[in-house]
Image (cartoon, rainbow, N blue to C red):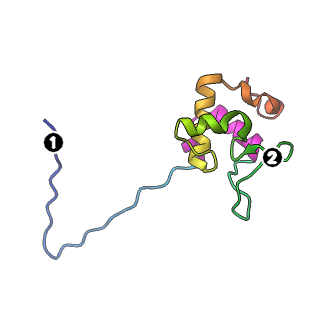
Amino acid sequence: MVAIPLLIFTPGASVTYQAPTPLTLEEKIGDPKLYAIAQCESNLRQFNEDGTVLRGRQNPKDVGLFQVNERYWLEESGRIGLDIYTEDGNIAMAKYIRDTRGYKPWFWSVQCHGVR
């Protein structure tokens, strides 16, 4: 059996709604090691000031917050239903990479973030 909450409205009473507080980027990422990686990879940015997706300076196939490389991860991200061009999709893909490959894919920036 499932309990269903009962709402009782009193005519003339005011009802207020408080929207949930959005999560911070740190809360969205949830993993301090991944957060450190994102700081080094993109300075915690998914987009440029003009609204375009941030791309790597050394490798333009690196995309967004975690600089997810299109060559290695774009097809797989699509297969699992993630869009690496959005902040949420880039974060989810970084977690997928971490869960399947560990932190090794970000070894090029280890001198910055220190995650091994």
Q: Residue furthest right?
A: 58
Residue 37, magenta (yes or no): yes
> Main SS type for the magenta part?
helix
At 66% from the left edge and 32% from the top edge, which residue is drawn? 33
Compare marks 1 and 2 and give the one earlier in the sequence. Answer: 1
Q: Residue 112: image x %, image y %?
A: 81, 35
Going by the numbered disc 1, the residue's amino acid type is Ala
- Quadrant containing the N terminus is top left
Q: Residue at x 55, y 36 (%)?
A: 79
Residue at position x 63%, y 34% in the image: 32
Can residue 46 be seen here? The reply is yes
26 shown above or below 21: above
Q: Which mark is residue 60?
A: 2
Helix, strand or loop for disc 2? loop
Total count of labels: 2
Q: Position of residue 18 (x, y in %)?
A: 37, 62
Viewer-nearest residue: 23 or 87: 87
Q: Position of residue 56 (x, y in %)?
A: 80, 46
Distance between the Cα atoms at labels 1 and 2? 52 Å
Going by the image, does 25 lie left or right of 13? right
In the shown orientation, is residue 37 left or right of residue 10? right
- 106 up-or-down from 11: above or below: above
Task: Name the residue rendered at 73%, 28% in the picture.
Answer: 105
Location of the C terminus (image quadrant): top right
Q: What label sits on residue 3 in the rendered view?
A: 1
Specify the quadrant of the image occupied by residue 92.
Answer: top right
Residue 69 is at least partly visible in this image: no
Q: Is 72 in front, or is 107?
A: 72
Given the image, on which type of amino acid does mark 2 rest?
Answer: Pro
Label 1, secondary structure: give it: loop
Which span is picked out in magenta? 25-42
